Image (cartoon, rainbow, N blue to C red):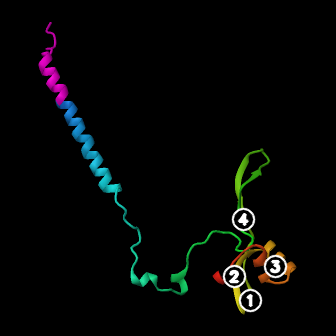
């Protein structure tokens, strides 16, 4: 029966050093590659002069959160439905938002807001959009 050959201690040490330097070099190459890929800041949308101009129509559409412009009401994301078999299913209770135009006396024009039905009742109770905006600290010039 032949036994496997054992390396001499000096060749074992050189083999170990070679492997160590190889792994160090590999780690260095990986670090350089990752910093070049993720290190520098590259803007996703480059600002061009055409984008700074105000647009109208479908080009000016932007996604907005479903929140009330006056009260700041947001959807209730912790609601659950309990079924007959007593399973609990998560559901989102959305805010009843409506697009509504109100005449602002201070601005001398109409403002179009996305408000909840509760906010509409609050505005009617207070008498004007200006009073409600003052109470809830909302700048109507934005709308």
Q: Earlier in the sequence, mark 3 or mark 2?
A: 3
> Circle 4 sits on which residue?
94
Image height check: is 52 above or below 35?
below
Q: Is residue 3 magenta?
A: yes
The answer to the question of whether label 3 and label 2 lie on touching residues, with beta carbons closer than 8 A, is no
Of mark 1 and mark 3, the one earlier in the sequence is 1
Contact (Cβ within 8 Å) of mark 4 with mark 1? no
Residue 108: which quarter of the image?
bottom right
**Residue 71, magenta (yes or no):** no
Q: Position of residue 56 (x, y in %)?
A: 53, 87
Query: Which picture quadrant has residue 138?
Result: bottom right
Q: Earlier in the sequence, mark 4 or mark 1?
A: 4
Tag 1 and tag 3, C-beta contact below 8 Å: no
Q: Badge 2 is on which residue?
A: 140
**Which sits earlier in the primary sequence, circle 4 or circle 3?**
4
CB under 8 Å between discs 1 and 2? yes
Which residues, given as a range, are shown in magenta? 1-17
């Amino acid at each position: 029966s032949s036994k496997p050959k054992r390396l001499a201690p000096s060749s074992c040490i050189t083999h170990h050093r070679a492997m160590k330097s190889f792994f160090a070099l590999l780690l260095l190459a990986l670090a350089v590659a990752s910093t070049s890929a993720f290190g520098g800041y590259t803007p996703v949308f480059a600002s061009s002069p055409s984008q700074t101009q105000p647009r109208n129509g479908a080009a000016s559409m932007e996604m907005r959160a479903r929140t009330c412009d006056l009260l700041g009401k947001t959807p209730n994301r912790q609601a659950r439905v309990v079924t007959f078999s007593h399973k609990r299913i998560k559901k989102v209770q959305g805010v009843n938002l409506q697009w509504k135009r109100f005449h602002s006396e201070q601005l001398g024009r109409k403002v179009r807001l996305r408000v909840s039905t509760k906010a509409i009742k609050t505005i009617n109770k207070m008498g004007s959009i200006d009073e409600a905006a003052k109470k809830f600290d909302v700048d109507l010039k934005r709308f």
